[in-house]
Amino acid sequence: MAPLRWFARIVDIPLRAWQRMTGQGGMIALFLLPNMAIFSVFVLIPLGMNALYSTTGGVEFFLADRPYIGTAHYQRLMDCGNYLEPRSCRDDMFWIAVWNTARFVVLQVGLMTLAAMITALILNRAIPGKAFWRAVFFFPVLLSPVVVGLIWKWILQRQGLANLGMVELGLEPVNWLIDRFWAFAAAVGVSVWAHMGFYTLILLAGLQAIPRDLYEAAEMDGTPPFRVFYRITLPLLMPNLLVVLVLSLIRAVQIFDEAYVLTGGGPGTSTMFMTQYIYEQGFANLLRNPGLAAAASILMALVLVVLTLMQLWLSRRAGRS
């Protein structure tokens, strides 16, 4: 222990000197400095560079080689005759991606929240093998999104397991990943399957925090199960439900990996979402446009900021109530 004590005394000398010069605030800043440096290198500086890229044109990657064009990319993205009709917009692919993402968010968040709620209610009951079933529902969360996409691509492709089973049952095979409707439905369904376990655990934790005596009192009064759910379970579960809604909403806006592996954005543009549009504009297209991709990502970031502010506002409102 003696070497450690000597080492601590040596380290104390500059720390005590720094505290005498700067006070308690200086000590707090000193310990926060490493984290702030890492945050700046990996978040703030890339964010600032992205904003700079969005004001430049050309196909070069280095900022010094790119001409300044101001807000031209933003004007191009927002130049639209009718925002509900992407073909009337100057950059129709951007608005197709926006509306695909909006439809995906509504369907995926709604279905996943409903499925997570039903699963959590079932797993909260005294059923045989409860721990096993909890592990089964949480297992997809542990998989890489690319692995999830590949697994379901092998299942849903023309000669995959799904069509093999349908043929064995005497049914006609379905072009799951070629038909526009079924490809979009597959993207939504696979995303729900991959992420539902995480949100089920959040709701399950909320259900287990509800006092049991409330249910016992309701049972003694002969309250119907639906009324118990509506009057007791749902109000007390609302903070957890709010967290699930906002987190899943933000995650759904950022959909890319498993959907891109599953469908590649097709058929046509039926499953092309915002993040894929940004990726293709910045890196994948032959005529890449990093500035336009940066402008689209800034607009997407603004949407996420609005969703985060909504989360804070709703959380505080739920806390006060």
Image (spheres, helix red, strand yellow):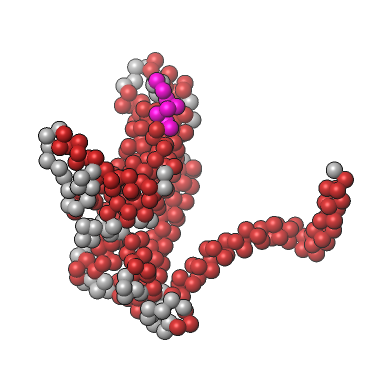
Q: Is residue 221 visible?
A: yes
Residue 237 is at least partly visible in this image: no
Which x, y percent locates residue 27? 74, 58
Tell me: residue 62, above or below residue 14.
below
- Give the quadrant of residue 31: bottom right
Above or below 17: residue 117: above
Horizontal and vertical percent position of residue 226:
31, 26
Q: Which one is in front, 174 or 221?
A: 174
Question: Which stretch did the figure color magenta?
Answer: 128-135
Is 134 colored magenta in this rendering? yes
Which residue is located at x 44 percent, y 50 percent?
Answer: 311
Residue positioned most to the top: 220
Expressed as whole percent of the image width and height from the top left, the position of residue 312 reads 47, 51
Q: Name the residue rendered at 33%, 49% in the picture.
A: 149
Q: Is residue 44 left or right of residue 196?
A: right
Q: Position of residue 290 (x, y in %)?
A: 39, 73
The image quadrant that residue 286 belongs to is bottom left
- The tally of labels here is 0
Q: Residue at x 37, y 78 (%)?
A: 59
Left or right: 313 with respect to 176? right
Q: Residue sitting at 35 percent across and 61 percent down?
A: 275
